[in-house]
Amino acid sequence: MKKKIIISGYGKVAKEILKLLKEYRVLFTKKYNIEFIVVAVIGSKFLLYQEEGIDIDDLSLYGLGSSSLENYAKNKRIKSKTLNDIKGGLLIESTPTDINTGEPGYSYIKWAIKNKMDVVSLSKGALVKYFDEIMEMKIESNSQIKYSGATMAALPSMDVGLYSLSSTKIDRIEGILNGTSNYILTEMYNKEENFDQIIKRSQEEGIAEKNIDYDIKGIDTANKLYILTKSLLTSTMNYKSIKIEGIENISIEKIREEKRKGNKIKLIGIADDEGIEVRPMEISQSNPLYYVDGKEKGIVYYTKDMGKIVVSGGESSPKGAASSAIKDMINIYR
Ligand SMILES: NC(=O)C1=CN([C@@H]2O[C@H](COP(=O)(O)OP(=O)(O)OC[C@H]3O[C@@H](n4cnc5c(N)ncnc54)[C@H](OP(=O)(O)O)[C@@H]3O)[C@@H](O)[C@H]2O)C=CC1
Ligand SMILES: N[C@@H](CC=O)C(=O)O
């Protein structure tokens, strides 16, 4: 089965998606009988469209963003197209996250669903701002939408909650949901390194959000937990009621003091039917999240009938995020 893929946002994650699709092309055909053909990549200033499929090797010679799409197209004498030229397929939404407007992800997702396409979203803005509307739209259109990349990516949080815990009630979710802030806190704990130096490194490694405040001020944690809560819990809470505190005021002295007591400070998100809270917490060795370090993340589901389920690992990285998006694509069509 051939499946046309359209990607919005040609950045770090999108580039890894292309690489992985090429690397695993034969495996996916053999294992799932699915061949993904990337026919369009949409940038903010250029829309690259090739019905026969984009040459991934050639495109990888250029950098990231619209200018790379344009340079590739120039070389192949292709003109920029519009969304109206694209018919059918699956949209991978990987533009920057903006929770104030939900854009540009919201417009791309709406366009795809209206055109009866399926969607895999890595960006979180549209899901945070328009979750109910998007879910209604996809039912009307009979489209499928998956968003592992927006909910801890390489760490399987949605899949565990949605499939493995489908028969029980999830009473509470607790987790370390943001790799960048966990990396910062871990480096401060282990090396007593300066906050800004670690931030710089996480940006260079491509795991930080475009707006670093999202990582360090707890917003990315709140976003992921909100999307998980809307998907897995029965609460009807709204985003504005989330209490959010970040790690920007955590000092080396405070970390040292907790270390002496045998504790670690972690940025924890907690969700239950009462609401969501995000804040740095001192946790002891009896808490499974104590052992989640570096760029890794962890989630604990407290369920009514299956007890406590802990999932950890899946460190934040553009490649891990790319792989989680491809997993969603496979799980839609297998
Ligand atoms: N990096 C990571 O490890 C992870 C990221 N995510 C999420 O995935 C998304 C993408 O992340 P990442 O690849 O790191 O981000 P980048 O900033 O590297 O890439 C985003 C790209 O989107 C393009 N873009 C901006 N505005 C528009 C627009 N209006 N239309 C089309 N394209 C646009 C930009 O290029 P140009 O403007 O030149 O076209 C840019 O290159 C984010 O929402 C992030 O939250 C999720 C999990 C992990
Ligand atoms: N900035 C995020 C990346 C994915 O959502 C993180 O650090 O976990």
Image (cartoon, helix red, strand yellow):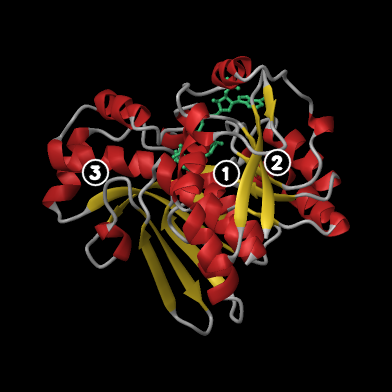
Badge 1 or badge 3: first in the primary sequence: 1
Q: Residue furthest bottom?
A: 305
Q: Which residue is mark 2?
A: 129
Q: Is residue 199 above or below residue 319?
A: above
Image quarter (top left, top right, bottom left or bottom right) of the C terminus: bottom right
Q: Nearer the viewer, residue 40 or 192?
A: 40
Image quarter (top left, top right, bottom left or bottom right) of the N terminus: bottom right
Image location (x, y in percent) of residue 141: 86, 55
Q: Amino acid at mark 1?
A: Leu
Is label 1 or label 3 in front? 1
Residue at point 21% right, 27% down? 194
Image location (x, y in percent) of residue 171: 55, 71
Does dot 2 land on a helix, a strand or a loop? helix
- In three-dimensional space, the C-alpha distance between marks 2 and 1, rounded to whole angstroms, equals 14 Å
Q: Nearer the viewer, residue 157 or 300?
A: 157
Q: Which label number is shown at residue 122? A: 1
Examine the rendering and report whether any part of residue 272 can be seen: yes
Asked if ligand 2 lies within 8 A of label 3, the reply is no
Badge 2 or badge 1: first in the primary sequence: 1
Q: Kindly indicate the quadrant of the structure image that contains residue 205.
A: top left
Image location (x, y in percent) of residue 69: 59, 22
Q: Which label number is shown at residue 331? A: none
Q: Which label number is shown at residue 186? A: 3
